[in-house]
Amino acid sequence: MSDTHCNLIAGRWRPGAHARENRNPSDPSDLIGLYACAGIEDVAEAAEAAAAALPAWQAQGTQARADLLDRIAAAIDTRAVEIGTMLAREEGKILPEAIGETRRAAQIFRFYAGEALRIPGEALASTRPGVEVTVTREPLGVVAVIAPWNFPIA
């Protein structure tokens, strides 16, 4: 039998509301595993856990956040072939495309590492003399997302 995969919520691996088979689209006889499907309560608890962790993340300096995102990118790059092989099996993609998707995920982490260091705000021209206009954007906060099945890592 194949592996059973759980959801990671608040630092603990746990089953979801129900499990679902994941089969290799290019070889339906290949059962990759059983995956936990999160229910409404699971999603709510995950969002609450993320919201509870947010103050500690915000309290870190911008350099610490950028460094962590860079380390994640490096770890993904180091394991790009391994992760890409898993993705090819799960998605039915050809291996070079799946590895490329993995490398793209690392690029996204590097991009946001740079964003963490960028000086916030945007200066705009004012219609009034002697008045400066600065636009700053604040993060929305914790959100629940359903990622596209055909690009789960990127």
Image (cartoon, rainbow, N blue to C red):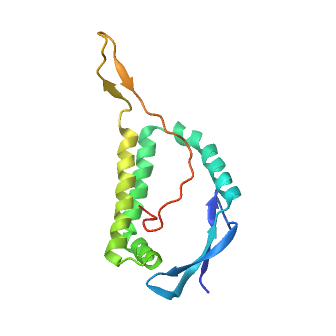
Say which of 128 and 83 sits in front: 128
Q: Quadrant of the N terminus?
A: bottom right
Q: Is residue 128 above or below residue 10?
A: above
Residue found farthest to the front: 127
Identify the residue at image location x=66%, y=47%: 48
Quarter of the image holding residue 93? bottom left
Q: Is residue 52 above or below residue 78?
A: above
> To which quarter of the image does residue 137 belong?
top left
- Asked if residue 10 shows in the view, the reply is no
The quadrant of the image that shows the C terminus is bottom left
* Residue in the foreground of this view, choosing between 122 and 111: 122
Q: x%, y% of residue 6?
A: 63, 68
Farthest residue, direction top: 129
Q: Is residue 1 left or right of residue 112?
A: right
- Asked whether, in this view, residue 26 is left or right of residue 57, the answer is left
> Which residue lies at the image location 41% right of the left edge and 45% below the top edge?
66
Q: Residue at x 51, y 87 (%)?
A: 30
Q: In which image quadrant can residue 76 be found?
A: bottom left
Q: Position of residue 120 (x, y in %)?
A: 38, 32
In the image, is 91 to the left or to the right of 4?
left
| Outermost residue toward the bottom in this view | 29
- Residue 50 horizontal/vertical position (percent): 60, 48
